[in-house]
Every structure is written in structure tokens, then in C-alpha cells.
Amino acid sequence: MDIQKLAAHVVLLSSPGLGHLIPFIELGNHFALIHTHLKVTLLAVTSQTSEAETQILNSAMKTNLINIIQIPSPNIFHLIEYDAAPVTRLCVMMREAKPSIRKALSNMTLRPSLFIVDIFGTESLSIAKELRILNYVFVASHAKFLSLVIYTPVLDKQIEGQYVDQEEPLKIPGCNLVPPEDVVDPMLDRNSVQYEEYREVGNRILESDAILVNTWEELEHKHLQALRDEDLLGQILNKIPVHGIGPLVRQRVSETSEEFEPLLQWLDKQPNESVIYISFGSGGTISFEQMTELAWGLELSQQRFVWVVRAPTKVSADAAFFTTKYFNSGDNEVADYLPEGFLSRTNNIGTLIPEWAPQSSILRHRSVGGFLSHCGWNSTLESITNGVPMIAWPLYAEQRMNATLLVEDLGVAVRPKVLPTKKVVDREEIASMVREIMVVDENMKRNPIRGRVKKIRHSAEKALLKGGSSYAAMSRVVKTITSKS
Ligand SMILES: *[C@@H]1O[C@H](CO)[C@@H](O)[C@H](O)[C@H]1NC(C)=O
Ligand SMILES: *[C@@H]1O[C@H](CO)[C@@H](O)[C@H](O)[C@H]1NC(C)=O
Ligand SMILES: *[C@@H]1O[C@H](CO)[C@@H](O)[C@H](O)[C@H]1NC(C)=O
């Protein structure tokens, strides 16, 4: 490419881990596609030991949309406890990588016009400031999450004692009341190093020139407005613009291999919106008791399903009666953990998949009409943009706030009355939730929650098109940098 012709250079900084790398590749592609005269470079701090990471970097390079410069993640073993929490690990790693990041930024032949970091890279904002480069923060999650992050330093001054011990819900301007048990993982223990790191992220975001969030106006109008309103969170942000530029979802790469052909063929044979897809995300597992209830619940609901089943996390003493095989052999067949006869009884209506499934292809299949999900933002966006309502099933503290957002704020999901992390959700409740999102009301001739999700899907499509809110926000950003360089 002719450097003279390039109007501006956007540089992105991703921290280690696929969850941080992938959103930046999406963002980089998005910039490159929206404006062909932009040069986009991703500085990726990488672990260099992960095969999945290498694969993703390679396929990103093949598209020729963005340049990638890898920065090997620095050795931090001497700086942290061996059992340091993930947030601590990432923040320390990104701090130690600063000299390399600085070097990479100042050595670029085409001077960067804009530097974008995620919440773990906020310490590098100071480098950009020093080099007089415009700098933004990209929040790959939702606006409510951003609200909580920037309000944490305020809560820190206001509230005595642990957040989780508060009698009253936490009040964050512009958000529905946040139940104390809904706070994100790093806030569970205020005496931890992880909490301090997290709180400081909230302060450092305020040094940026603007914030990009993976959401859109029509989805989170209230939260975005609160971030701009001087009487609400706008006061803290002090005129730092917040742009909703989403939904950025994974590119529709063909992820299906021959292995999954039978599954897709099975889906092809099912009626429209008749199958519920069940997956707890990569690596998510549930207990043996919960797995039993889920199996019975699915059967009781009489709905078709595709279930990504993994061996349960813990098997209690009582369970030994049912699963002698589990204890006596190394056999990992998931069938061993399921109720007696479940497989034969559900043979016609269900498909089990071990370990991993081509999620995007499943969610966008016309016969899929529901998703039981662990509420990662990623999966949520995939579900919404395919018009699929959800059962919100948070597995970790991190995901509880997402569950609340989906159920109470957006109305695109239902959820169990008890927290699945605290108690087993029983089969009757599961069956009733499944029916609530899957079954079409005879009188109304529709399913109300599905209707709502479809409306939101439509708003997402519109937001990204010319004239839409997210498109306009991206254009504003591009205009800022192209007129400056
Ligand atoms: C999104 O999901 C895919 C697969 O389920 C995973 O590889 C990726 O890391 C996720 N991205 C984020 C941002 O969590
Ligand atoms: C099923 O969905 C497809 C694609 O969305 C649509 O073309 C078709 O008309 C639908 N079939 C019925 C019976 O509604
Ligand atoms: C929501 O889900 C995203 C994606 O999995 C996760 O990174 C984030 O921490 C979650 N946010 C909250 C507030 O739970």
C-alpha cells in the first residue's frame, strides 16, 4: 500500500488471552472496512504458547485488513504471587510490557494517529500522551459494565466494609439498583490486590480522550445517556465522549468442519425456531446434580435441543449410586452422567455434542429458537443478533451482572429464581423456563420474549448500517483522526 495515500494510522493494543485478542481483531477489521484509507496495526501482547492464539493471529493476518505486531508477554513470575488473580496478572503483565509497547509505538514509520487500549492496557495511555497521540479506551463489554468500572473509585470512598456485605443495593447513577451479590469478581474482596488494580482501571480510564463500547444506542440508551449526563456519570467522565459502536460480533468465518455436518443436517430437518441450544461457554461446567436436573428439565419441556455436554465438575457421594461407571473407570462418555434412559427417550428430539460446538452456525440456524447461556457478552451478542431469546445461567460472579442486564434491563432472557452458583435449579423450573422462551402463545400467535429479541436484532442491524447510530459513531471517530493527520 502507498503510505502517502493512507490518511491515518490506528494502533490497537491487546492484552494476552483470546478473550482480549479477538475483540481487538474485530475492532481492527471494523476500522479497516469502514474506511479503506486507514492503516490499522494491532500490537498484540501474546503468550506465544497458545496454539489457539497462533491460529487466530494467522487467520487475522490472512485477511490483509490489519497488520499485527506481536509483543511477547514479559516474564512476571518474580513480581506476583503464584496464585495471583487474573486481573492482577494481566495488569502486571501489561505494566511490564510498557517499554516494549513504547518502543513499538515510537518506531512506527507511519506515525499513529490514534492509539486504542482495552481496560487492561490503560496504563499505556500515558505513553500515548507522552508521544502526543490521541488515545481511546475500548470496552469490549456493555455500557453498564463501563458504568460500574468508572464508578468503583466513588463506591470505594462511599462504602465501608465489603460490598457483598452491604444491606442495601449499590446505587450507580443511571443504572437500576445493583444487588451487592451482583458485583464483578474483582470487587468480591476489597482487601485483594486484584481489587486495587481494578479500582485503578476506573481512574485511569478517565485519562483517555474517548471511550468506545461494544454496544449500541438502541440497546442501552439509558446507560449511554447516563454516561453523558452531567448530573449522572457524565460528571465523572468530565466530557470524555462515549461512543456505542457495536454490536461487533465474530466475523462469520466458516467454523464448521465435516465433523459437524450431521448436526447441521439434523438442524435442517427441524421446524423453524423449535430447537434450544445449551452451552455454558468454553470451559464452563456444572455439577452432577445440576446436570441431572437439566436433563430431566429438557425432557419435561418436550422441546427439541442441542446440548454441549461436558463431564460435571463435582460428583457428590449420593451420585455414586447412579454413576458407578464414573468412579470405576476412566471412561469419559458423557452419557454416563445422564439419567438412565435419557438418551433413548430423547433420541428423536435431542442431539448431544461433547466439548465444543460451532456456536455461530448453530445460533444463526433458522431452526434454533432459544439459547441457555452462561451470559458472556460475546454469546449474548451472537444470540441477540440472531433474534434468539435466552435463559440466563450465570456460572461465575462475573456473569451475574450480565444476567441481570439481560433479564431486567433488556428483557431478552429469563433466569432461574435461585443463583445457579448457589443452589441446584430443579427440573420443573428448567422445563418452565425452556417453555417460556420456546413455546408460541396460542392466543397471541407469538412468543412475547422472542418478539422483543427480534426487535432488538433489527435495531442492531440498523445501528451498523449507514445512517445508523454505531455507524455514525465510527464515522465521527474516523473523521477526528483523518482531519488531524
Ligand atoms: C467469544 O467466543 C469464542 C468461542 O466461543 C471465544 O473463542 C472468544 O474468545 C470469545 N470472545 C470473547 C470476547 O469472549
Ligand atoms: C422458516 O424460516 C425460513 C428462513 O427464515 C423462512 O424462509 C421460511 O418461510 C420459514 N418457514 C416457515 C414454515 O415459517
Ligand atoms: C459480561 O460478559 C463478558 C464477556 O464474557 C465478560 O467479559 C464481562 O466481564 C461480563 N461483565 C459483567 C459485568 O459481568
Image (tube, rainbow, N blue to C red):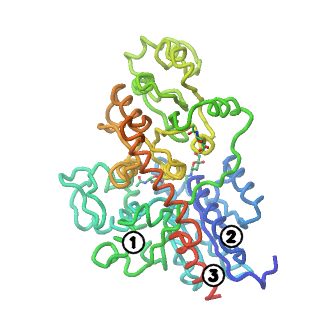
- Which label sits on residue 386? none
Circle 3 sits on which residue? 113
Seen in the picture, residue 234 relative to 340 is either above or below; the reply is: below
In the figure, 119 relative to 35: above or below? above
Q: Residue at x 49, y 38 (%)?
A: 280
The mark that comes first in sequence, 3 or 2, is 2
Dot 3 amino acid type: Ser
- Give the camera-side residue of 275 and 208: 275
Measure how far apart labels 1 and 3 are at the Cα level.
24 Å
Badge 1 amino acid? Asn
Give the mark, 1 or 3, whose residue is nearer the N terminus.
Answer: 3
Q: Is residue 369 left or right of residue 420?
A: right
Beta carbon at label 2 within 8 Å of ligand 1: no
Q: Nearer the viewer, residue 21 or 248?
A: 248
Query: Element at badge 2?
Result: helix
> What residue did someone put label 2 on?
32
The mark closer to the camera, 3 or 2, is 2
How many numbered badges does the structure rendering display?
Answer: 3
If the picture is divided into quarters, which one holds ligand 2?
top right
Q: Is residue 211 left or right of residue 425?
A: right
Name the image quarter holding the C terminus.
bottom right
* Image coordinates for residue 113, horizontal then vertical, percent: 63, 81
- In this view, the residue in front, 433 or 481, is 433
Give the vertical position of 453 relative to 122 (above or below): above
Disc 1 CB within 8 Å of nearest ligand 3 atom: no
Quadrant of the snapshot with the N terminus: bottom right
Q: Secondary structure at mark 3?
A: loop
**Residue 347 image point, x, y percent:** 56, 19
Q: Residues within 10 Å of mark 3 (few under 14, many from 20)?
A: many
Is the residue marked by circle 2 packed among few (<14), some (14-19), or many (20+) residues within 10 Å? some
Task: State the mark number for residue 203.
Answer: 1
Name the front one of labels 2 and 1. Answer: 2
